Amino acid sequence: QVQLVESGGGLVQPGGSLRLSCVASGSISRINVMGWYRRAPGKERELVALIPSGGSTKYADSVKDRFTISRDNGKNTVYLQMNSLKPEDTAVYYCNVVGLGAYWGQGIQVTVSS
């Protein structure tokens, strides 16, 4: 069993910042890719950012230069620093980890509103 626990979501005003964290625990072998996805109301789930164990990070065009993904391999943790948040960033954010299998977190709400 693999568990992914997300934290750091909430309500923030436009222009504000939040930092999401996702800790992976359980029967985890080598973790390759860690990432964040999101699903806005009425929309499909979409990629936000990916960080492979080696290689370049990848971002959705809509979040480039505002969001930064990072990881701490010793802690099996992936982070998403979100700056200059916009109302259109409102969504449920999901952590995703790929190793021998692919695993998803339960999702965490991020609401950007004044």
Image (cartoon, rainbow, N blue to C red):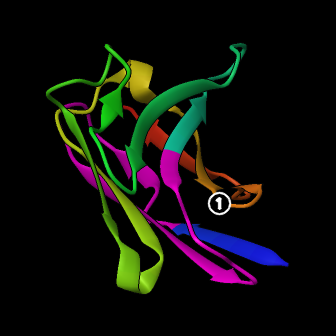
Q: Position of residue 10 (x, y in %)?
A: 46, 54
In depth, the one of 1 and 41 nearer the eye is: 1
- Does the stretch in magenta take in 31? yes
Residue at the spot 50% in from the left edge and 53% down from the top edge: 34
In depth, the one of 13 and 23 nearer the eye is: 23
| Type of amino acid under label 1 | Gly
Dot 1 falls on a residue whose secondary structure is loop
Quadrant including the N terminus: bottom right
Quadrant including the C terminus: top left
Residues shaded magenta = 7-35
Vertical comparison of 21 with 29: above or below = above
Residue at the spot 30% in from the left edge and 38% down from the top edge: 57
Q: Position of residue 45 (x, y in %)?
A: 67, 25
Position of residue 3 in the picture relative to residue 69 (left or right): right
Vertical comparison of 14 with 101: above or below = above
Position of residue 98 in the picture relative to residue 86 (left or right): right
Residue at the spot 68% in from the left edge and 14% down from the top edge: 43
Position of residue 65 in the picture relative to residue 61 (left or right): left
Q: Position of residue 33 (x, y in %)?
A: 51, 51
Q: Can residue 10 be seen at all in this image of the molecule? A: yes
Q: Position of residue 30 (x, y in %)?
A: 58, 71
Vertical comparison of 43 with 53: above or below = above
In depth, the one of 69 and 27 nearer the eye is: 27
Position of residue 70 in the picture relative to residue 107 (left or right): left
Sort mark 1 into few (<14), some (14-19) or many (20+) by Cα contacts within 10 Å: few
Residue at the spot 38% in from the left edge and 32% down from the top edge: 113
Vertical comparison of 9 with 77: above or below = above
Q: Which residue is mark 1?
A: 99
